[in-house]
């Protein structure tokens, strides 16, 4: 009779942290757009969208960490309630061109399930692009009706 014990070091699903002091960062090419993702046609034939942000980071960078880096250079995206939808853009192996796959979203001022998702968990490969659709909350405040004399405060 034998038993198999898997220690945390042997667990394939567990991610080892990157030693950021000793590991060289990778160049992450990020493309930002308002409200929707870029079309994959904009990445065709060696072209890329014009609004590129280059970030040096590591494979263990989280979506929340990337959100904070985008907010540093994009003041409009700092408003509470702003959503960041992340998608990977990668070469299509079956035909010329690129494919896009959603990987998660974060929200400024709120916790989301994808905050701690890393690039490696998203199956990012060096050379892929990251497309981020930024959705800023509406500027208008909801209209309040005037109080009626019989309303209690």
Image (cartoon, grey):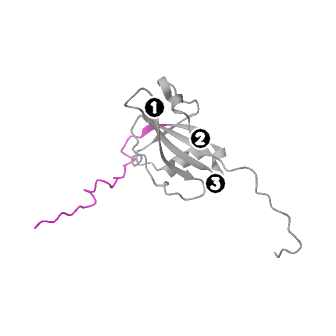
At 54% from the left edge and 52% from the top edge, which residue is drawn? 106
Q: Is the Cβ of the residue at disc 2 closer than 8 Å to that at disc 3?
A: no
> Helix, strand, or loop for circle 1?
strand
- The answer to whether residue 139 is above or below residue 26 is below
Secondary structure that dominates the magenta span: loop
Query: Is residue 45 found left or right of 70 in the rendered image?
Result: left
Q: Which is more foreground, mark 2 or mark 3?
A: 2
Q: Is the Cβ of the residue at disc 1 closer than 8 Å to that at disc 3?
A: no
Residue topped by disc 1 = 98
Mark closest to the chain's N terminus, 1 or 2: 2
How far apart in space, not on screen, are marks 1 and 2 (Cα)? Answer: 17 Å
State yes or no: residue 141 in magenta: no
* Extent of the magenta region: 1-29
Residue 54, percent from left and from top:
51, 36
> Helix, strand, or loop for circle 2?
loop
| Along the viewing direction, whichever of 94 and 7 lies nearer the viewer | 94
Residue topped by disc 2 = 36
Query: Is residue 134 found left or right of 59 in the rendered image?
Result: right
Residue topped by disc 3 = 81
- Can you tell which quarter of the image residue 150 is in? bottom right
């Amino acid at each position: 009779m034998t038993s198999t014990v898997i220690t945390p070091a042997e667990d394939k699903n567990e991610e080892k942290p990157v030693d950021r002091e000793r590991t060289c960062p990778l160049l992450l090419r990020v493309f930002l757009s308002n409200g929707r993702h870029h079309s994959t046609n904009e990445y065709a034939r060696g072209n890329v969208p014009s609004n590129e942000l280059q970030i040096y980071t590591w494979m263990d960078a989280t979506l929340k960490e990337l959100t904070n880096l985008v907010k540093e250079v994009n003041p409009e995206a700092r408003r509470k309630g702003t959503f960041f939808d992340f998608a990977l853009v990668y070469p299509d192996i079956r035909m010329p061109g690129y494919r896009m796959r959603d990987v998660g979203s974060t929200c400024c001022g709120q916790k989301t399930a994808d905050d701690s998702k890393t690039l490696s968990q998203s199956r990012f490969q060096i050379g892929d692009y990251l497309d981020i659709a930024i959705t800023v909350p509406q500027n208008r405040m909801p209209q309040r009706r005037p109080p009626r004399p019989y309303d209690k405060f």
